[in-house]
């Protein structure tokens, strides 16, 4: 699932969940209305919901033009974006980006510029999803549009190094763009055992070249009992507040460098030229897993909030009992407060596909995580109302 709060009105929230659901709240998350999103290109998961300071909401997702996505001959032929001028009202019919013959376009994310004039999207292009042919590869692409989101620039290849098409550790994936305070664009992704970073100082037209900013020990394709595959891919965000860390770039991910799965963060104050020592976000002991992380930076207060699943309260390492934690930093990522926001744990059975990520959004102390919960094999989507004041 994905969630966004309006910077214009924190009571307005829009969320998306697979495959084609859109959820709208106008009272800060207390009540929700759920509808089905439709598009002539199809709606097939990987929901990404982002909000603009000028009331707009954008919903990006995968395409399903022939209604047979993920079948042997199916094609995810483009990334689709739909726009609503207010909280979930009158979604546009949708515009596609990245159409490139028979290549698959997958795992997208987007970011809106602080002046609301531009929206940037990045994703993974597969020559052919699942192909084992040596000549087939994956690369990170990025494109941009004005606030209407109707006309998108020709995609630009960002990643210098290509990955394979097997949708695993050696596939280039996890591109989450972030826009800087002066309109610069940043993005990080995972490939092999490393997190790569690139930046554009001209609004996404040209890119500086791949830079390794940290290790993702064990790769991004991680395994958790009761869940199966868990993505540890990096998330990139920028502090837009007027606080002491304005302009700081944060990258958050999970890896297994300590044996269990932990949540990590690093930051840069010089547009990505140098990076801080990697900090652990979860503050529990050893041998308990934390996974499916996502991060947001409050654009008003500059607080950093990270959501993840947490098994620190289990008695045995193989216990599947799972809570949801929001970790918050009020000093630029140096120290962390961990809060359990789920009312009770759930115990996943590992019999259904659990999704690829959770999400979190925050404006002026109003923090809203979103996650999937499984009870008796049934999945549901939840939020918590965390208001810091």
Image: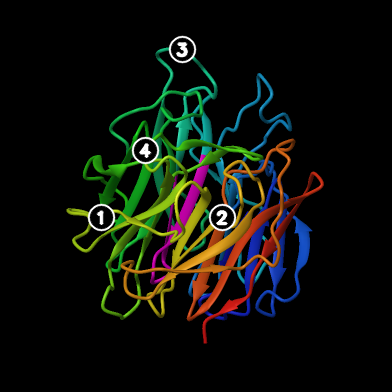
Q: Which one is nearer the viewer's eye here, 78 or 264?
A: 264
As measured in the structure, the alpha-carbon distance from the residue carrying label 1 to the one carrying label 3 is 36 Å
Most foreground residue, 226 or 235: 226
* Residue 167 horizontal side relative to residue 90, left or right: left
Q: Does any portion of residue 50 appear in the rendered image?
A: no
Q: Residue at x 23, y 57 (%)?
A: 276
Q: Is residue 111 above or below residue 137?
A: below
Q: Secondary structure at mark 4?
A: loop
Seen from the viewer's position, the closer of residues 252 and 167 is 252
Lower position in the chain sequence, tag 2 or tag 4 = 4
Give the spatial CA distance, label 2 vs label 4: 19 Å
Task: Identify the image quadrant of residue 32.
Answer: bottom right
Image depth: mark 1 or mark 3 in front: 3
The residues bearing labels 3 and 4 have C-alpha atoms spaced at a distance of 26 Å
Q: Main secondary structure of the magenta part?
A: strand
Image disc number at residue 310 = 2
Q: Which residue is mark 4?
A: 217
Spot the residue most to the bottom: 389
Q: Nearer the viewer, mark 2 or mark 1?
A: 2
Q: The N terminus is located in which quarter?
A: bottom right
Question: Mark 1 vs mark 3: which is more N-terminal?
Answer: 3
Density class for disc 2 (Cα within 10 Å; few <14, some 14-19, many ≥20) is many
Residue farthest to the top, as pictured: 133
Residue appearing at x 52%, y 82% in the figure: 388
Question: Mark 4 or mark 3, which is nearer the start of the sequence?
Answer: 3
Q: Earlier in the sequence, mark 4 or mark 1?
A: 1
Residue named by callout 3 = 133
Q: Is residue 73 above or below residue 100?
A: above
- Assign a secondary structure to mark 1: loop
């Amino acid at each position: 699932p994905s969630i966004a709060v309006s910077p214009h009105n924190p009571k307005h929230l829009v969320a998306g969940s697979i495959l084609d659901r859109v959820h709208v709240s106008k009272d800060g998350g207390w009540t929700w209305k759920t509808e089905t999103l439709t598009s002539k290109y199809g709606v097939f998961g990987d929901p990404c919901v982002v909000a603009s300071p000028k009331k707009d909401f954008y919903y990006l997702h995968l395409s399903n033009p022939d209604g047979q996505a993920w079948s042997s001959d199916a094609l995810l032929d483009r990334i689709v974006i739909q726009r609503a001028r207010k909280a979930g009202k009158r979604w546009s019919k949708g515009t596609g980006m990245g159409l490139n013959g028979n290549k698959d376009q997958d795992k997208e994310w987007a970011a809106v510029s602080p002046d609301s004039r531009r929206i940037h999207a990045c994703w993974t292009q597969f020559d052919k999803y699942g192909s084992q042919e040596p000549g087939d590869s994956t690369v990170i692409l990025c494109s941009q549009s004005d606030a209407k989101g109707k006309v998108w620039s020709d995609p630009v290849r960002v990643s210098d190094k290509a990955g394979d098409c097997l949708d695993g550790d050696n596939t280039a994936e996890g591109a989450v763009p972030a826009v800087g305070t002066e309109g610069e664009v940043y993005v990080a992704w995972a490939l092999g055992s490393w997190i790569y970073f690139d930046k554009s100082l001209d609004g996404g037209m040209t890119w500086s070249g791949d830079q390794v900013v940290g290790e993702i020990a064990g790769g991004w394709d991680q395994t958790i009992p009761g869940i199966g595959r868990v993505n540890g891919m990096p998330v990139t965000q920028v502090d837009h507040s007027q606080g002491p860390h304005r302009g700081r770039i944060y990258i958050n991910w999970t890896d297994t460098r300590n044996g269990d799965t932990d949540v990590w963060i690093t930051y840069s104050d010089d547009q990505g030229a140098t990076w801080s020592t990697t900090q652990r976000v979860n503050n529990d002991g050893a041998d308990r897993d934390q996974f499916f992380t996502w991060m947001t930076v409050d654009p008003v207060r500059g607080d950093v909030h990270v959501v993840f699943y947490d098994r620190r309260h289990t008695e045995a390492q193989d216990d599947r009992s799972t809570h949801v934690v929001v970790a918050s930093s009020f000093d630029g990522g140096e120290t962390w407060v961990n809060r359990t926001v789920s009312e009770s744990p759930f115990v996943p059975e590992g019999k259904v596909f659990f999704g690829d990520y959770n999400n979190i959004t925050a404006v002026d102390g109003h923090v809203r995580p979103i996650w999937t919960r499984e009870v008796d094999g049934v999945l549901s989507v939840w939020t918590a109302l965390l208001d810091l004041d």
